[in-house]
Amino acid sequence: MSHLDDLPSTPGKYKTDKVLHHHRYLRLSKLTLWASLFLALFLFYLLLSPPPSPSRRNLNDSSASSAAKYGGSHWEKQVRKSSRPRTPHNGLTVLVTGASGFVGTHVSIALRRRGDGVLGLDNFNRYYDPKLKRARQGLLERSGVFVVEGDINDVILLKKLFDVVLFTHVMHLAAQAGVRYAMQNPGSYVNSNIAGFVSLLEVAKSANPQPSIVWASSSSVYGLNSKVPFSEKDRTDQPASLYAATKKAGEGIAHTYNHIYGLSLTGLRFFTVYGPWGRPDMAYFFFTKDILKGKTITVFESPDKGSVARDFTYIDDIVKGCLGALDTAGKSTGSGGKKKGPAMFRIYNLGNTSPVPVTKLVTILEKLLKMKAKKKVMPLPRNGDVEFTHANITLAQAELGYKPSVDLEAGLKKFVKWYMGFYKKKSSW
Ligand SMILES: NC(=O)c1ccc[n+]([C@@H]2O[C@H](COP(=O)([O-])OP(=O)(O)OC[C@H]3O[C@@H](n4cnc5c(N)ncnc54)[C@H](O)[C@@H]3O)[C@@H](O)[C@H]2O)c1
């Protein structure tokens, strides 16, 4: 309805003009009132909103948890201090991505302990309880490792870190792990394991000097390969899960950056890593939790009614393999994004060479926990898990000095001890 419809019908030109004039005035004041109100609301909104961080520009930010908290002179001081080796000019300067993760925490602490400079980076995402990641962060801080909260897709943050510190090495462990979760959230695998890896390589290849990079691939790349034990020469073109496919893609991407830009790249195919401070989404961890609670656990069997088996590898052995890979990594040959010559490209299995049936894992846990498990045996669903893994570690033995020494029973004993202590203290969790 038009506002003119409201005009009283009054005879006489003068009177009509006066009314019209009065009405126009009313209209104008109404408009001014609304405009002032709108302006006031807008100013109020501006006052309440935090200023945008100039350094936060995620190319592919899919997780709310990646909100970066960095910048400022105090922050730079912490970054420099953490990255400095104990003895100047002696020791590595390592950026560890995924530092608050299971493997990242152990590797960072081991590096720091022997005197290397270590800076952590982690986005503390909610794939599993972030409180566990924060507790690991506390452990890292007590060891002198500062963890920057940010995402590997945040290229501006990565560039900033490489500006502030001349990293000699990158230990790249940040990834979306877990095989089954890929059916719920496939995008998170592409975001971290592919896009994030490319962001990191892009920044590393342009850095001057370029760092040497060691990164975590996975035994899952062997997929449906049935030739045992799995050797680095075996085919890896039949992934059984999206997780495996993204790790396999990572190996191809690593080769490209090595070939074009002269980045030194070493991929490590970890085989089912377990131990204290482990990942709650892994069977040994949630079996422990459920057995203690008296809850039924589901144990999968292969289609021929055989037990599913894993080449369980204790965390301390994996850490030794990671340090061996960092220590033997050749220098990158490029600088400022230009290749100067061929650089090292390697891939190794880091396993334990003795697959153990999951039924045996349960028996060991029952013994250690002094409790009988309530079991439900089910056929292995087609959700990405493979029936068995078994590593051939000859290459890592020869070239990295890798020699796993902890068997499953001894390793689980340490895990259970940690679990009981940690969750007793955190009984409110
Ligand atoms: N644990 C195993 O059995 C195993 C086996 C094979 C391969 N791996 C690989 O080893 C590496 C470490 O695994 P883990 O068991 O410690 O897993 P984890 O989930 O405990 O650690 C990964 C860490 O990376 C962080 N992260 C994930 N996406 C990120 C991103 N976009 N930016 C910054 N941080 C991010 C997570 O918050 C987490 O703290 C991963 O690459 C994983 O795929 C692990």
Image (tube, rainbow, N blue to C red):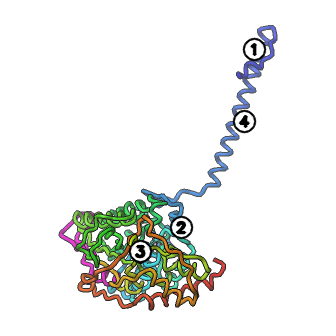
> What residue did someone put label 3 on?
305
Image coordinates for residue 99, horizontal then vertical, percent: 45, 75
Dot 4 falls on a residue whose secondary structure is helix
Mark closer to the observer (2, 4): 2
Residue situated in front as seen by the camera: 65 or 288:
288
Lower sequence index among marks 2 and 3? 2
Location of residue 383 with respect to 30 vertically, above or below: below
Tell us which disc is closer to us: 2 or 3. 3
**Span of residues in magenta:** 321-347
* Number of marks in the rendered image: 4
Is label 3 in a helix, a strand or a loop?
A: loop
Q: Splitting the image into 4 quarters, where does residue 427 fall?
A: bottom right
Residue 126, numbered label: 2
Q: CA distance from mark 1 to mark 4?
A: 24 Å
Q: Secondary structure at mark 1?
A: helix
> Which class describes the residues within 10 Å of circle 1: few (<14), some (14-19), or many (20+)?
few
Q: Residue at x 68, y 44 (%)?
A: 40
> Residue 248's spot in the image, x, y percent?
32, 66
Note whether 344 is above or below 115 in the view shown. above
Judged from the image, the quadrant occupied by ligand 1 is bottom left
**Callout 2: 10 Å neighbours few (<14), some, many (20+)?**
few
Q: Is residue 362 left or right of residue 4?
A: left
- Amino acid type of the residue that numbered disc 1 sits on in the rendered structure: Asp
**Badge 2 or badge 4: first in the primary sequence:** 4
| Residue 195 sits in quarter | bottom left
Residue 311: quadrant of the picture: bottom left
Q: Nearer the viewer, mark 1 or mark 4?
A: 4
